[in-house]
Amino acid sequence: MTSQLAYKETFDCVQCGYCLPACPTYASLGKERHSPRGRINLVQMAAEGKITIDEITESMELCLGCRACETACPTNVQYGKILESFKKVKAAEAPAPFIENMALQKALPNKKLLAVMRASLRAYQKTGIDSFARKSKVLSILPEQLRAFEEIAPAVEMPNKQLRTGILLPERDPNARVAFFTGCIMDVFFAKINDLSIKLLQHAGCEVTVIKEQTCCGALQNHSGDTGTSRKLAKENIAAFEKGNFDYVVNAIGGCGAMLVEYDHLLADDPEWAERAKVFAQKNKDVSVILNKLGISFSRELSGAVTYQPSCHLLNVQKVADDPVQLLESIPGITYIPLPKGDVCCGSAGIYNIVHYEESMEILDAKMEQVQKISPDTIVTSNPGCHLQMCLGVKREGLEEKVRVVHIIELLAKACGIDHK
């Protein structure tokens, strides 16, 4: 079993400690075993049979998987591959609960089920049941973390069907042919951001198509060690997007984008799919990269002090750092203020803030200390998970009347005079 651990990769770590300041769990928990260097050492010892998988499980599962350590590492240790190998071995040894498996394997890739979930959430909010549930204390039966996120859940919008059908022509001479990736959870909670992204791409001169056969990216399944389901979903997506001769496959979801650009690693050992995965991965771009590359024209002047909390997977896996900042700095009227320690994870990390709520809140509270130092009017994010986490941080600090949280697409669309409807 332990022979499946990424043992060879652990020797690339020279134990120098450059990763320590970049690791959120080392900063919050203060123990070597909760640092990248410590975790690599634990995996090495487990692979050598000196300790068991159970003995390293707590340390490994408390890792956010933000991969900031990879960016900080001077010897290019493939920490993500080491962590992934542990998740795979752990999943084989102790399969996830039935409900979790059903959610990851059956629910997320099921568009009809997600549509029902979106409609149900919208009805829950629109009919006022949510307000009644809070006042009546009926939500007290839920775990603390679910109550916390229920209170900051965004207003659920239905996707614009006209933007999801056929080929959408650009506002000006076409610069690129783009296929848009909508994601699964993103299109339930943040369909509005997907709609605005599509309109901004048209504004930038892109011909845009939303491929109806696309499915879940497989990130959450891969993070849970269910590589088999991730590989299946990757093949479905690659086959779906091969149907058009697109210049780019674009998304507005930092976490999903990181999975899509690593399909070539996921399928590297599959002779039929390796090359197709490589071509697909190279075409995948975050929406900020395309908009910055092609250029957008602003028609409204905004105001206020804006800071940016990047998605870890956008920053550390996709290596997209400058494009979002350059776009923000180009918006007329706003003052961009860099967030101190902005490259440190906010504690969201997929479902980490649900399954490790207390540890996640410690990391979030540290993040909000940095926010308080610069007192912005607006916190800009680039991923739905980060967006919800920062909304929760604002609420925990009692800043709801002073600070708003928006996706970068919302701010750009407003400055370009693009409305949702």
Image (cartoon, rainbow, N blue to C red):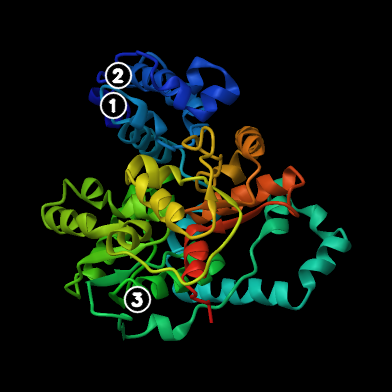
Residue 107 seen by the camera: no
Question: Label 1 sits on what residue type?
Answer: Val
The vertical placement of 369 against 293, above or below, is: above
Query: Label 1 crowding class (10 Å Cα cut-off): few <14, some 14-19, many 20+?
Result: many
Residue 203 is situated, as x and y percent measured from the top left of the image, at 36, 75
Q: CA distance from mark 3 to mark 1?
A: 40 Å
Q: CA distance from mark 3 to mark 2?
A: 45 Å
Q: Quadrant of residue 359?
A: top right
Residue 9 seen by the camera: yes
Query: Label 3 crowding class (10 Å Cα cut-off): few <14, some 14-19, many 20+?
Result: many
Left or right side of 16 for 379: right
Q: Quadrant of residue 208?
A: bottom left
Residue 20 is situated, as x and y percent measured from the top left of the image, at 45, 20
Residue 85 is situated, as x and y percent measured from the top left of the image, at 33, 35
SS at circle 2:
loop
Question: Label 2 sits on what residue type?
Answer: Cys
Question: Residue drawn 60% across and 38% down?
Answer: 356
Give the residue number, with chain letter if any, for mark 2.
13
Give the residue number, with chain letter if any, for mark 3.
202
Q: Nearer the viewer, residue 346 or 415?
A: 415
Image quarter hosting the N terminus: top left
Instruction: Indicate which disc, 3 or 1, sits on the residue closer to the N terminus.
Output: 1
The vertical placement of 242 against 406, above or below, is: below
Residue 220 is situated, as x and y percent measured from the top left of the image, at 44, 51
Question: Label 3 sits on what residue type?
Answer: Gln
Question: Residue drawn 29% across and 80% down?
Answer: 172
SS at circle 3:
helix
Q: Nearer the viewer, residue 370 or 252?
A: 370
Q: Quadrant of residue 110?
A: bottom left
Q: CA distance from mark 2 to mark 1?
A: 6 Å
Q: In this rendering, which labeled residue sits more in front, label 3 or label 1?
A: 3
Q: Which mark is residue 77?
A: 1
